[in-house]
Amino acid sequence: MDWSRPGAVVRSLRHRFSPRNAAEVVAVLVLLTITLSTLSSSTRRSAGSLQSKACDFPAIFNFGDSNSDTGGKSAAFRRLLPPNGDTFFGRPSGRYCDGKVVLDFIAEKLGLPYVSAYLDSMGTNFCHGVNFATGGSTIQPLDTRIFEEGFSPISLNIQLSQFEQFKARTLELHAGKSDYAKSSLPRPEDFSKALYTMDIGQNDLHAVLKSMTEEQALACIPNILNKFAVAVQKLYQQGARAFWIHNTGPMGCLPYDIISYPPESNNTDKNGCVASHNRIAQEFNMQLKTLVSKLRLHLLGAILHYIDSYSAKYTLISEAQKHGFGSPLEYCCRHYGDYTVDCGKKAIVNGTKVVGASCGDPSKVISWDRVHYSHAANQWVANRVVDGSLSDVQVPLTESCRESIRF
């Protein structure tokens, strides 16, 4: 009997049953065929819908330096001055930029509000996450050398302690039925469902380059990344499961590096960047990527994405004119003249007041203030970050909570 042919089945049944019964059997077979077809189609539609459904991240918890600071350092030490923030916010927003940083574009993509700085106590709402990043922060804990170089005392281990305290207090306030907790803090279950973003390490490399040879700086990278691994593991122990980890950018292309470490002819790449500094950044990134792969094996149930921001930023610098920008090594916010006055600062030079002001069109400049990227450049980079093309597992930001992407 050929059971794959419905006609053969019906003819066999006709021999065994009366015409009336045979008709009933045929009707049942037809009904079963329609039902199975409908169920199969429905299952395919449901699977497709489930696969394409965006992750529902209720909050973002961010750890980093000035590349993702949304007001931490400004609130803790000294408020940033105009023209910072002018392009988008119309006022200083605590960001080292004329507008938004990459973290802001990530929040927008997830449909969340901009992530407020933990240290900003003025009317701040933390319902959808907290930003622990501060300008000048390092992975390494503060020591005399790092402090004397002018970097922030709020290193990654301090940011982690702040998170642990924030979570503990949040849970206590919710347990006590606090109205403040309901209106201004994440729900207890949000900590395990949130996205944990990390963008830190550039200042560690700058710190060692200021006091060491390049060979000594390279030798420091494993120890720096060991401390980063400890932070990730502690976040995992606190319930973090979805990580979005950025590597460091081509710091040798920052106008600050080019001015502070004028490259010799044999230490300059095709774009005029300090080639040795970029090699150090690339070595850091290679070891960071290896570390993320190892953490995937040990942190069961966690999903870790390694984001190659270096590639996006170097591509933008290499193809600046193609993407509507001017000279990639120029910067926007400064005093235009014979004297250096930092962005937003004022000085008296030979009896004349000079100001570190914005250039005419920040949208055409990649670097905002010698160290940080402009709003337009951040947006260009963020567009490539959120679409997943920079992720080592090629998954868009909006689907980065899925267990199925592990390998």
Image (tube, rainbow, N blue to C red):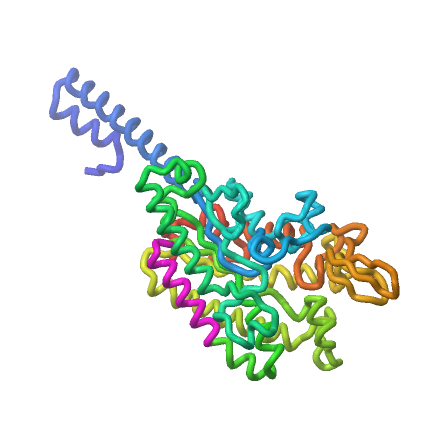
Q: Where is residue 370 in the image (x, y as percent from the top left)?
A: 71, 63
Residue positioned 61% across, 59% down in the render? 312
Residue at the extreme front: 351
Residue 392 shows in this picture: no
In the rendered image, the quadrant that contains the C terminus is bottom left
| Closer-to-camera residue (276/392) | 276
| Residue 258 place in picture, x, y as percent | 72, 72
Vertical arrangement, residue 92 with respect to residue 313, above or below: above
Quarter of the image where the N terminus is located: top left
Question: Would residue 189 be seen by someone viewing this image from the given angle?
Answer: yes
Tell whether position 236 is magenta. Answer: yes
Find the magenta span and give its range.
223-240
Asked if the stretch drawn in magenta spans residue 217, the answer is no
Residue 226 x, y percent position in the rendering: 43, 72
Apparent side of residue 308 relative to residue 271 in the rendered image (left or right): left
Q: In this view, does 115 lie to the left or right of 230?
A: right
Query: Which residue sits at x=35%, y=56%?
Result: 238
User: Could you say which quadrant of the image residue 300 lies in?
Assistant: bottom left
- Percent position of residue 337, x then y: 85, 63
Tell me: 390 left or right of 400.
Answer: right
- The residue that appears at 84% across and 64% down in the rendered structure is 349
State whether the magenta stretch is mostly helix, strand or loop: helix
